[in-house]
């Protein structure tokens, strides 16, 4: 039995019915006794990667209707996490729903088993666990978008809302082949590998993609138009009011704005035949937004991009680290080596995989006119040695 899973529902048996997911041979996931709804849950989280494994899984997941625990539990942060004398539980699922997950925190990065109540709606921190496992295998999960354009593999990376997806969208109608969005996995051979998960498009993205907008339902188009206006109206009223009504409206405005998006499969943007999912890192774009109205691009060293991205990766790991600190509070004698050493591993792999790559920093306003990104990026790619 894997350490940290002393109270799992059952031992993992090789002959037990299961459904496998395979992240390009990097991380293998096995769902035991999976219902169709369980497979759909995993597919929503990590993309349509169901494929038989020819090796032992790195991560085993067992969905159950109930995860009873007769022993006394001590809370770390009520009602988020708790523990018995040897097992650590997460107590919330998607959207904060009350649901238990037996979470083997000190086994993250090694082979581990997660047991999750179905009412959770997802497997908590699954992508972070996958990324830590990939890191252990010498593969770098990078917060990035990637595509191949005119035979050149382009990796666009930066901070959240920096313009990674925008760079991808700018080339969607120009014959680019989709590799990935959100997370791209870099391998020692110079490869980059992505997942065909849906792309989150905000209302201002959709306004610049008329072909996509025409495919959306009338209700969806109306929602995308009305929510930003409603948010602005709420913010305006909050500025004129005082007390509790003003406070409620101030909190309501950003919530409304965060709902003004639609999830679109990449096949609808690039075409099914253009989903490559694999490519080579030939050129790196370090994308950042600035307070100017212009779009600019200039050379930057790959080493500099690598140095910038250390903080970005730590930021993305933040939710997992918060839970890890709760675990360490409850079990001060136990730890997860890969989490403790993640920054050092990432630094080494970033320098190795990006340090010698031709790179440019792309600066732009946000929101940005997608068309305005094309010319500068094409100029940089044409100038490659």
Image: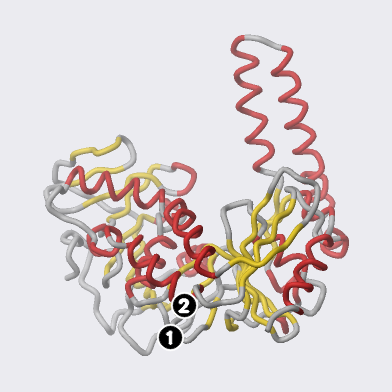
| 91 horizontally vs 274: left or right | left
Q: Residue 70: image x %, image y %?
A: 16, 47
- What residue is pinned by disc 2? 23
Q: Which mark is residue 150?
A: none
Q: Position of residue 282 (x, y in %)?
A: 61, 81
Q: Nearer the viewer, mark 2 or mark 1?
A: 2
Horizontal side of residue 172 vs 41, given as left or right: right
Answer above or below: position of 281 versus 322.
below
Rendered residue at 58%/58% (across/down): 158
Residue 191: horizontal and vertical position, in percent?
52, 83
Which residue corresponds to the image point at 71% horizontal and 60% vertical from the top-left?
166
- Name the residue at 53% across, 66% down: 183
Q: Which of the pair 261/144 is nearer the observer?
A: 144
Determine whether 272 is above or below 293 in the image: below
> Does 101 appear above or below 172?
above
Q: Which residue is mark 1?
A: 52
């Amino acid at each position: 039995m894997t350490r940290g899973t002393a109270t799992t529902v059952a031992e993992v048996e090789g002959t037990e019915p299961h459904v496998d997911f395979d992240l390009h041979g990097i991380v293998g996931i096995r769902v035991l006794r999976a219902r169709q709804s369980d497979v759909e849950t995993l597919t929503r989280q990590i993309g349509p990667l169901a494929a038989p494994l020819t090796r032992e899984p790195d991560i085993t997941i067992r969905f159950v209707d109930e995860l009873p625990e007769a022993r006394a539990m001590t809370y770390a942060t009520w009602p988020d996490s708790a523990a018995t004398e040897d097992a650590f539980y997460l107590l919330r699922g998607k959207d904060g729903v009350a649901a238990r997950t037996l979470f083997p925190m000190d086994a993250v990065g090694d082979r581990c088993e997660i047991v999750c109540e179905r009412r959770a709606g997802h497997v908590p921190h699954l992508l972070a666990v996958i990324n830590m496992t990939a890191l252990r295998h010498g593969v770098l999960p990078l917060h990035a978008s990637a595509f191949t354009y005119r035979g050149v593999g382009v990796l666009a990376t930066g901070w959240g809302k920096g313009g990674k997806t925008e760079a991808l969208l700018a080339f969607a109608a120009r014959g680019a082949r989709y590799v990935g969005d959100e997370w791209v996995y870099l391998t020692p051979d110079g490869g980059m590998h992505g997942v065909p998960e849906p792309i989150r498009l905000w209302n201002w993205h959709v306004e610049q993609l008329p072909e996509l907008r025409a495919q959306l339902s009338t209700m969806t188009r109306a929602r995308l138009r009305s929510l930003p206006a409603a948010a602005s109206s709420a913010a305006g009223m909050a500025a004129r009011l005082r007390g509790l009504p003003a406070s409620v409206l101030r909190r309501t405005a950003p919530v409304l704005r965060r709902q003004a998006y639609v999830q679109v499969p990449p096949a609808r943007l690039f075409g099914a035949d253009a989903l490559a999912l694999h490519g080579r890192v030939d050129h790196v774009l370090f994308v950042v937004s600035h307070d100017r109205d212009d779009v600019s691009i200039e050379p930057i060293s790959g080493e500099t991009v690598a140095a910038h991205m250390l903080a970005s990766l730590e930021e993305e790991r933040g939710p997992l680290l918060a839970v890890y600190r709760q675990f360490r509070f409850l079990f001060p004698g136990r730890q997860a080596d890969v989490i403790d050493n993640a920054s050092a591993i990432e630094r080494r792999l970033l320098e190795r995989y990006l340090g010698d790559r031709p790179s440019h920093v792309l600066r732009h306003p946000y929101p940005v006119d997608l068309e305005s990104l094309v010319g500068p990026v094409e100029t940089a790619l044409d100038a490659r040695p």
